[in-house]
Amino acid sequence: MEQEHQEFNNQKKSSLLKRFGVSLAGGILGGGLVFGGAQLVTNDSTNSVVENKGNTQVSTINYDVKSDTTKAVSKVQDAVVSVINLQKQQTSNDPFGGLFGGGSTQSSDNDKDDLQTTSEGSGVIYRKDGDNAYIVTNNHVVSGSDALEILFSDGTTVKGELVGRDSYTDLAVIKINSKNVKTVAEFGDSDAIKVGEPAIAIGSPLGTEYASSVTQGIISAKNRSIQNTNDDNEPVNINAIQTDAAINPGNSGGALVNAAGQVIGINSVKIASSNSGVSAEGMGFAIPSNDVVNIINQLEKDGKVTRPALGVTMYDLANISSQQRSQILNLTDEVTAGVAVITVQNATPAEKAGLQQYDVIVDIDGEAIESASDLQSILYNKKVGDKIKVTYYRGKDKKTTTVELSIDQSALQQNNSDQ
């Protein structure tokens, strides 16, 4: 094709040189390259375009567009699937069908026939191991499911088995039979991405009807802190990549891809409006791939994520009045950010390290603490058995202690039950 196009240009250039002279050839030839379609139809009868005699025709000239985007999409697109959340129907024992507000509802005990599609999201096949393959998606995509179905890009549907999920990072892992898996996605280094570089989102916006949709934008920002609560009122805290690639409901769990076709994030959430109600566009967020890999490895192994526990309840200093800071916490005016310890549980790392009620934590391992979310983020990046250096104020005195994170969240919950 390129050779035919070059021969045509050479012929064209030769003809123009003869008719208009050398000095005009460059400009006219340049115009030919820009508006080549029109010129091909009107000026050259040797082309394969059929002369229009009343019936509009389609050009038989073919071309093959290749770019970094098309290459990246072709590399990973078949590894992006739709995740269908199936739940049991709620049946009513009210003979009047709720007409008078009576009766109650209960889940049906029947099997597949009573399962209905409750929601649809996306997922990414990231590993194939013998007869099994593994998919990463968002926790909120699979939340409440009684069964899961996976729809491949070629229309094939298979059953999915939930391996584990983590509400805090909004991630989950699903296992499927590997028979139909032809493509496995590769994770890229999310720490290496640059603001302004291309970003491609692949998923199923608005559900399976628009499966395998591709949108493109850029990396808008790194390390955005997104805090929310899920349907179970559990905290969700994401250290996110911000992108303006279009992300809509159904894209959740899908891939954010770089120009090399590597998955650099799992799409999770978008902002449609601010707290004040101002509409927003192009503000989507993805969980960085480096964080994803850490979580899914634990979910594959244990079905859950084990996180250390400190053993305190906290309150943001920013939400405490200046009068309470002075009279109850006995702080100086210079201390304006941190978290106040409200309670310390018995036999916990915090108690063993000497932390007490009304201490105000301002720093952990050299990182400033301005909110309970900051403390939780640092703590949840540690492992059971790690030690952390905690800087805090007890009244006007600034102190430092070392806390050994000897128990996890489940042990803390058991400790609370025993007490």
Image (spheres, rainbow, N blue to C red):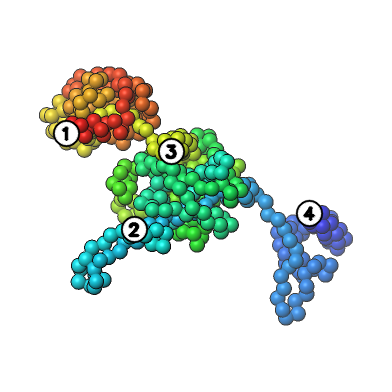
Task: Give the mark nearer the N terminus: 3 vs 2.
Answer: 2
- The residues bearing labels 1 and 3 have C-alpha atoms spaced at a distance of 44 Å
The one of 356 and 62 positioned closer to us in this rendering: 356
Q: Quadrant of the C terminus?
A: top left
- What residue is drawn where x is 30% and y is 33%? 410
Task: Give the mark nearer the N terminus: 4 vs 3.
Answer: 4
From the image, tell me which residue sits under label 2: 109
Q: How packed is label 4: few (under 14 Cα within 10 Å), some, or many (20 or more)? A: few
Callout 1: SS: helix
Q: Amino acid at mark 4?
A: Glu
Task: Give the mark nearer the N terminus: 1 vs 2.
Answer: 2
Q: Amino acid at mark 1?
A: Ser
Q: How packed is label 3: few (under 14 Cα within 10 Å), some, or many (20 or more)? A: many
From the image, tell me which residue sits under label 3: 299
Instruction: Specify whether residue 25 is in view.
Output: no
User: What x and y, as percent, mark residue 291?
Assistant: 45, 36
Q: Amino acid at mark 3?
A: Leu
Q: Quadrant of the N terminus?
A: bottom right
User: What x and y, as percent, mark residue 129?
Assistant: 56, 40
- What residue is drawn where x is 32% and y is 24%? 405
From the image, tell me which residue sits under label 1: 322
For this orientation, the residue located farthest to the front is 110
From the image, tell me which residue sits under label 4: 2
Q: How packed is label 1: few (under 14 Cα within 10 Å), some, or many (20 or more)? A: some
Does residue 119 sit above or below 243 in this rendering? below
Callout 2: SS: loop
User: What x and y, as percent, mark residue 316?
Assistant: 24, 35
Q: Amino acid at mark 2?
A: Asp
